Image (spheres, rainbow, N blue to C red):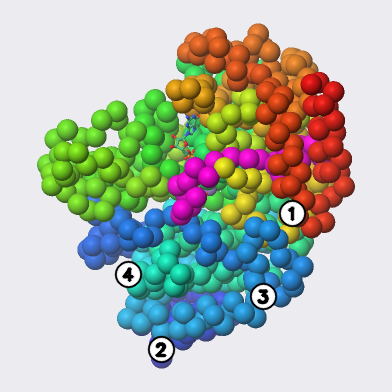
């Protein structure tokens, strides 16, 4: 491309190493044009995407997109962390040698963007000026315009983020080539897709998808996998799939900060956007810092454990989002918000969108409506029960649209972390909440988080599996090394956070109803946890942690049957003793698991025996 230098000059892209990177991949992929993107290009790109039919209007300044029907979720099987050192092999990171994967990806990418524009997206996965900003800069190259529009919502985007780097080489090189989606053999033995993070070269090479975590490389690939690797290599920080909230007590003026890991599609966005239940709203307010990723580090001056959200937007699960479960989410995606919907049902004539759980019943007047695959609802057979929206359909909106966004969300300082919680979809055994005050026991508990996998990844929905700290799909290096690093980072903090395991998803074994109402009421066990940390309540000690008594939980206005309440505040010892055997097998898979973790495991097992 003869005029590439001129394009980069015109865009004011001055970092010589970024220019070199762009040139290398423009040549390799054979892209016909190159365009450098700033956040201010959003309106024009939206217009172009609508004109090209890549997006449809969904009412006033709101947009709709449909992905290829075999390209609707992350693919864990095709996702690989590659490095130059086999010591980085873990159980979950699908490790391969960099020397094998790079040429393989380059082969797939060669000439694959011919006829297309290669967009250059310089971004920062941190508030500018944050202590971890040196690891947060990146440049994503992509050949799909809707990926650019998502990145503008999900990350801070602009050339200034890479021009001004102290070390001009310190940006993540992220390349996304979509490929011919209709001929990639998704899910067959001949699957052509590969999603590779070459972690020790800070290079991300993704081929074969234009969907979410496979394509928005700042988010999952950099924000989680690369971030985790960098945090460990530098010994400075943790990059976790955590939500991050502030709980403000208007009576005392105190704000607590809680972060926590729940596997994909298991409640992080809902918790972060929570409106306090009516009975508690006068006293408490929950503010949103992040709903999917938190980076944690110890502040050098104060010695406190700090957290920040590297993202700039929300890529949230649509299913079951409604005025009761999550009013803040609905407000953040109303008309005029520039939100983008993916794979929901749509009525282009009225601008409406719909997904399962948005209202109790689907639209009755089906005229104009199409399902997530584009098929008119009017043509449906009466007995067709297929979902109108894909179960992993999503909305994308920028943080500033979130009604309960924390006023200081964009500040470089981050916030001190008071509590770290873990949870997942666990239909039995796990009580509503159990608090853990010891660091090693808290880390042990996170490592043994067992939950049902969800539709956010292909082919695993409903499968019970361990998901350490909810990071299983994002684990970048060995799990034993990860545990060591976690203990070291959090252990260095002056004031230790309290840990807890929560479960909103316990079910009645007979009729399957959720025992706990969940959603807004989830604030109640969290308030109990903070009171416990504060010494205001004592709870009841069990082998697996401290659980609240019925009297200690503020249950004013909660609709729950007494026998359901009793069940979610009870430890089923037999079931737990059986679980300990599974945990032992689980932990034994990992090399170099720190002795502190094994000690915690043995302590819990012995306490269970004593209690039995
Ligand atoms: P990712 O974005 O995939 O990482 O997921 P997430 O953890 O942010 O999940 P999200 O909050 O979007 O929740 C996913 C699903 O869980 C939605 O269908 C919610 O309606 C449902 N959900 C969230 N909180 C609760 C709860 O307290 N109880 C019940 N029963 N369902 C919940
Ligand atoms: C997840 O799957 O955990 C997500 C959505 O947060 S994605 O960006 O597709 O990974
Ligand atoms: Mn996630």
Query: Which residue is pictured at 28% across the width and 50% down the height?
Result: 372
Using the image as rendered, state which of residue 140 and residue 265 is in the foreground: 265
Query: Which residue is pictured at 32% across the width and 50% down the height?
Result: 343
Image mark count: 4
Nearer to us: label 4 or label 1: 1
**Residue 299 horizontal side relative to residue 356, left or right:** right
State the extent of the magenta-drawn residues as a range. 438-463
**Residue 99 horizontal side relative to residue 282, left or right:** right
> Looking at this rendering, what residue extends furthest in the bottom direction?
2
Q: Which residue is mark 4?
A: 182
Mark 1 and mark 3 residues within 8 Å of each other at the beta carbon: no
Point out the tag, 2 or 1, that comes first from the N-terminus.
2
Q: Distance between the Cα atoms at labels 4 and 1?
A: 38 Å
Q: Which residue is mark 2?
A: 1
Residue 322 to residue 218: above or below: above
Query: Which residue is pictured at 38% across the width and 45% down the height?
Result: 391
């Amino acid at each position: 491309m003869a005029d590439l230098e001129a394009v980069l000059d015109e865009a004011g892209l001055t970092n010589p190493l970024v220019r070199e990177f762009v040139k290398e991949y423009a040549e390799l992929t054979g892209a016909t044009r190159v365009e450098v993107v700033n956040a201010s290009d959003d309106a024009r790109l939206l217009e172009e995407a609508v004109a090209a039919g890549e997006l449809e209007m969904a009412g006033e300044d709101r947009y709709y997109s449909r992905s290829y029907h075999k390209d609707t979720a992350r693919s864990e099987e095709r996702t690989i962390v590659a490095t130059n050192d086999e010591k980085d092999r873990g159980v979950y990171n699908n490790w391969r040698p960099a020397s094998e994967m790079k040429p393989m990806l380059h082969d797939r990418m060669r000439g694959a963007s011919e006829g297309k524009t290669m967009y250059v997206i310089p971004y920062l996965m941190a508030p500018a000026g944050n202590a971890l900003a040196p690891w947060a800069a990146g440049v994503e190259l992509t050949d799909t315009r809707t990926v650019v529009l998502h990145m503008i919502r999900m990350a801070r985007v602009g050339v200034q983020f890479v021009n001004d780097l102290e070390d001009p080489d310190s940006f993540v090189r992220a390349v996304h080539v979509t490929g011919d989606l209709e001929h990639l053999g998704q899910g067959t033995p001949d699957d052509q897709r590969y999603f590779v993070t070459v972690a020790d070269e800070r290079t991300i090479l993704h081929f074969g998808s234009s969907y979410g975590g496979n394509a928005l490389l700042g988010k999952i690939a950099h924000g989680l996998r690369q971030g985790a690797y960098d945090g460990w290599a530098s010994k400075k920080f943790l990059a976790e799939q955590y939500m991050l909230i502030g709980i403000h007590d208007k009576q005392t003026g105190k704000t607590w900060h809680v972060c926590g890991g729940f596997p994909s599609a298991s409640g992080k966005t809902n918790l972060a956007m929570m409106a306090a239940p009516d009975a508690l709203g006068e006293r408490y307010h929950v503010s949103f810092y992040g709903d999917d990723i938190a980076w944690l580090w110890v502040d050098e001056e104060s010695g406190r454990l700090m957290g920040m959200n590297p993202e700039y937007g929300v890529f949230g699960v649509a299913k079951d989002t409604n005025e009761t479960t999550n009013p803040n989410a609905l407000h953040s995606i109303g008309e005029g918000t520039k939100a983008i919907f993916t794979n929901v049902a749509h009525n282009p004539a009225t601008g409406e969108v719909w997904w399962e759980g948005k209202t109790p019943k689907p639209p009755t007047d089906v005229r104009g409506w199409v399902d997530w695959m584009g098929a008119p609802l009017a043509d449906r057979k009466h007995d067709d029960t297929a979902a109108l929206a894909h179960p992993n359909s999503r909305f994308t909106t920028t943080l500033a649209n979130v009604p309960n966004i924390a006023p200081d969300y964009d500040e470089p300082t981050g916030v001190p972390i008071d509590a770290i919680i873990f949870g997942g979809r666990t239909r039995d055994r796990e009580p509503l909440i159990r608090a853990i005050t010891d660091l090693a026991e808290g880390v042990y508990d996170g490592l043994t988080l067992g939950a049902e996998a969800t539709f956010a990844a292909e082919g695993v929905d409903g499968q019970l599996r361990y998901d350490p700290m909810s990071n299983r799909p994002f684990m970048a290096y060995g799990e034993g090394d990860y545990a060591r690093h976690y203990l070291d980072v959090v252990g260095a903090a002056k004031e230790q956070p309290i840990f807890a395991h929560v479960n909103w998803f316990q079910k009645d074994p007979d009729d399957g109803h959720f025992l706990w109402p969940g959603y807004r009421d989830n604030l109640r066990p969290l308030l109990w946890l903070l009171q416990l940390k504060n010494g205001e309540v004592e709870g009841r000690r069990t082998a697996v942690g401290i659980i609240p008594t019925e009297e200690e939980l503020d249950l004013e206005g909660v609709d729950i049957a007494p026998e359901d309440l009793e069940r979610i505040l009870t430890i089923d010892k037999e079931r737990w003793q059986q679980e300990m055997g599974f945990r032992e097998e689980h932990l034994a898979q990992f090399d170099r698991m720190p002795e502190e973790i094994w000690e915690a495991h043995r302590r819990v097992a012995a306490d269970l025996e004593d209690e039995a």
